[in-house]
Amino acid sequence: MAGVPRKPDEENLFAEIRANIVFEKMIVSILIATGLSAAAHFLLALAVRISAGGISIEAIGSLILNAIFFAAFFFLAGFAASVAIGIPLFKILEKSKFQKAWPYCAAALAVSFLILLAAGSPPSIEAPWRVLLLAPGLAAALLFARRMRPFWEAAARRERETQDAIIRLH
């Protein structure tokens, strides 16, 4: 039958559809973490300015602009990391049927640390507060895992049902 796709082609198609869904979940998680981290960046900088006693309209404008730049940089870095690391990691973990959050969290922390290292401001003993800059990547990974949990549970259910069906046939 010429019009019926073969099994490997169907599996490749389904794998690509799953990868697209995962990519969408990653980007949404990155956007949420970006918004929250930009707001936190602004509020922390505002609190520092207020405690120093030097608040003005120009200072608030500068803080808003810094938060926007932080958000833009974090989103671009997160987008690049999800394309370069997130999707390949998902494909590897999907083949081994490993559906846990910790590999994504570890990858997010590693990528965040490497980006901070490349920018010249990694967390260190001299600047321990920079550990907070690892939080947005970790938050995005945790949000991603939370958004993927229903898909992982459905895949596990399908796997159990397939195994039950095979047992009943014998």
Image (cartoon, grey):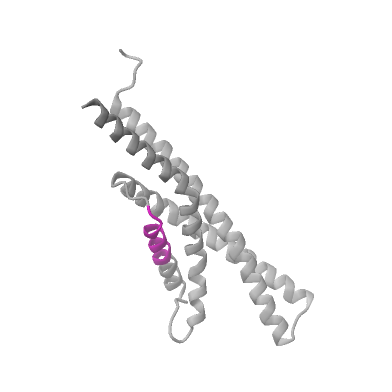
Relative image position of residue 124 (x, y in whole percent)? 43, 82
Residue drawn at x 40%, y 68% is: 114
Q: Position of residue 24 (x, y in %)?
A: 50, 45
Q: For this rendering, which residue is in front, 148 or 68?
A: 148
Residue in front for this viewpoint, 58 or 161? 161
Is 103 inside the magenta-drawn segment? yes
Q: Does 58 sit left or right of 166 as displayed? A: right
Question: In the figure, residue 62 lies in which quadrant?
Answer: bottom right
Q: Residue at x 48, y 51 (%)?
A: 26
x and y percentages locating residue 170 in the rendered image: 21, 27
Classify 43 as above or below 127: above
**Residue reaching furthest to the right:** 57
Residue 132: give x, y in percent of width and height.
52, 73
Q: Main secondary structure of the magenta part?
A: helix
Q: Residue furthest left?
A: 170
Q: Residue at x 43, y 62 (%)?
A: 108
Q: Residue at x 52, y 65 (%)?
A: 136
Q: Is 68 within the magenta?
A: no
Q: Nearer the viewer, residue 37 or 154?
A: 154
Residue range in magenta is: 100-111
- Quick check: 147 left or right of 169? right
Horizontally, is 144 left or right of 35 in the view? left
Q: Quadrant of the N terminus?
A: top left
